[in-house]
Image: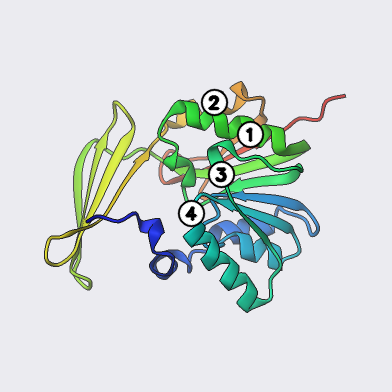
Amino acid sequence: MPINPYDDPERYDVRYDHIQKEAEFLKGVIKDGSIVIDLACGTGRTTLPLAQAGAFVTGIDISQAMLDRAIAKAKAAGIEASFIQQDAASFSLPFQADFIIMTGHSFQHLLMEGEQNSLLEAVFHHLKPGGSLYFDTRTPPHSGTETEIDEVNGTREVDTYDPQTGMLHSSLYDADERLIEALTIRYTEPEKLRPLLEKNGFTDVQLRQHWSTMPYTGTGTIVVYGKKTCRG
């Protein structure tokens, strides 16, 4: 029976917890004492470093298993952060933030344009005037099917991408060819990202290259920045 990779938080951390590029970049942007909402925070890979650096961070995730892992990690490290189980696409909190972030390519789990708009509408509502949004996504791959074999673990990953829908279906098989993981994500064409944010009220929209200040080059990870302009 295939499983959702987010149903196994410990395995998720083994695969991804070492990746800190997002947190390192954001620590250089987010000032001490800032209020931050971390959407689809998972096990706190970005939440915890920002909180440790002095931000007041609230992590939101739809998976209680991932949140339980994040809470345990925060407690073990003596880090203060809040965690709430909600769907990022329609989250609702009783406060506004200076920064709202969404890392780990979580934006790609929004499979319909309506979900993307719902999330961006909620983000805009929860940002203070002058507040900033940062999220990442990836450049669409070539169409067709790609297979990657892990010789160490004996696993085989098969990814099939349909450029017409933007959907990528990923299946992971173990050494005995049993399906152990299945996931569907959506790619958004880079040229559609700026209009998508502007339609939802954001200004100064920028596409940057892989958690840096450099402009997007057309390949790899895209970091999308938008601002909620102050209104007089």
Image disc number at residue 174: none
The crowd level at tag 3 (other Cα within 10 Å; few <14, some 14-19, many 20+) is many
Report crowding for label 1: few under 14, some 14 to 19, many 20 or more residues within 10 A (C-alpha).
some
* Crowd rating for badge 4 (residues with CA inside 10 Å; few <14, some 14–19, many 20+): some
When asked about the image quadrant of residue 230, the answer is top right
* Quadrant of image for the C terminus: top right
Cα separation between marks 4 and 1: 19 Å
Disc marking residue 122: 1
In the figure, is residue 138 to the left or right of 46? left
First in residue order: circle 3 vs circle 4? 4
State the residue in front, 140 or 165. Answer: 165
Identity, as a three-letter code, of the amino acid under mark 2:
Leu
The residue that mark 3 highlights is 135
Instruction: State the residue position of label 2.
Output: 196
Label 3, label 4: how many angstroms apart (C-alpha)? 19 Å
In this view, the residue in front, 26 or 17, is: 17
Secondary structure under tag 2 reads helix
Helix or strand or loop: what does disc 4 sit on? loop
Image coords of residue 120 (percent x, y): 59, 32
Looking at this rendering, what residue extends furthest in the left direction? 176
The residue identified by callout 4 is 63
The kind of residue tagged 1 is Ala
Name the amino acid, label 4.
Ser
Discs 4/1, front = 4
Q: Nearer the viewer, residue 179 or 221?
A: 179
Q: In this view, does 10 lie above or below 226?
A: below
